[in-house]
Image: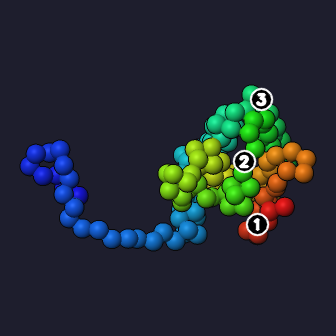
């Protein structure tokens, strides 16, 4: 769009569509998103706060890192596709899901053997797992 002489209205000069190759976009986002790759933890903390967490527990040692928190569980749709909010329209996405996805990509920068996202309690508990070879599963 270009501005007309009044400066308060836009004039349509063309339109079109484009397509984003999801796999390539995720690879680029994973590779270039953080100056300090450990910033992914901040994203997960933001997601926790946005889900109403009152307590957050962070544990890390040589072989395992874990972030757990209370608050509202993430929906099954988010666990089915943790990157959904990166590609969804503003009306369809949530900021908590967006932060979770960015944090996940940052975490994958370290090439962990396995990453698990768990949400809910009891029979409603859902878990998404990604292994080192890129296989993903929801249970």
**Of the numbered discs in the image, which one, if any, rests on residue 38?**
none
Badge 3 marks a residue whose secondary structure is loop
- Percent across and percent down for residue 130 are 77, 62
Q: Which of 18 and 41 is in front in this view?
A: 18
Let me know if residue 99 appears in the view: no
Report the residue marked by disc 1: 136
Report the residue marked by disc 2: 74
**Of the numbered discs in the image, which one, if any, rests on residue 55?**
3
Residue most extreme to the right: 122
- Numbered disc in front, either 1 or 2: 2
Badge 1 marks a residue whose secondary structure is strand
Number of other residues with Cα within 10 Å of mark 3, as a class: few under 14, some 14 to 19, many 20 or more = few
User: Which comes before the other along the chain, label 3 or label 1?
Assistant: 3
- Colouring: rainbow
Q: Is residue 36 left or right of residue 70?
A: left
Quarter that holds the C terminus? bottom right
Residue most extreme to the top: 54
Quarter that holds the N terminus? bottom left
Looking at the image, residue 70 lies above or below residue 36: above
Badge 2 marks a residue whose secondary structure is loop
Contact between marks 3 and 2 (CB within 8 A): the answer is: no
Q: Nearer the viewer, residue 50 or 100?
A: 50
């Amino acid at each position: 769009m270009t501005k007309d002489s009044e400066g308060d209205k836009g004039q349509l000069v063309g339109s079109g569509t484009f397509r984003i190759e999801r796999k390539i976009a995720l690879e680029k986002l994973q590779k270039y998103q953080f100056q300090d790759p450990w910033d992914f933890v901040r994203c997960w903390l933001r997601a926790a706060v946005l889900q109403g967490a009152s307590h957050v527990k962070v544990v890390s040692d040589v072989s395992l890192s874990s972030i757990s928190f209370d608050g509202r569980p993430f929906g099954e749709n988010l666990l089915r596709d943790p990157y959904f909010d990166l590609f969804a329209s503003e009306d369809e996405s949530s900021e908590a899901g967006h932060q979770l996805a960015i944090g996940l990509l940052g975490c994958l920068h370290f090439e962990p053997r396995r990453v698990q996202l768990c949400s809910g309690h009891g029979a409603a508990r859902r878990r998404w797992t990604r292994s080192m070879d890129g296989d993903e599963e929801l249970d």
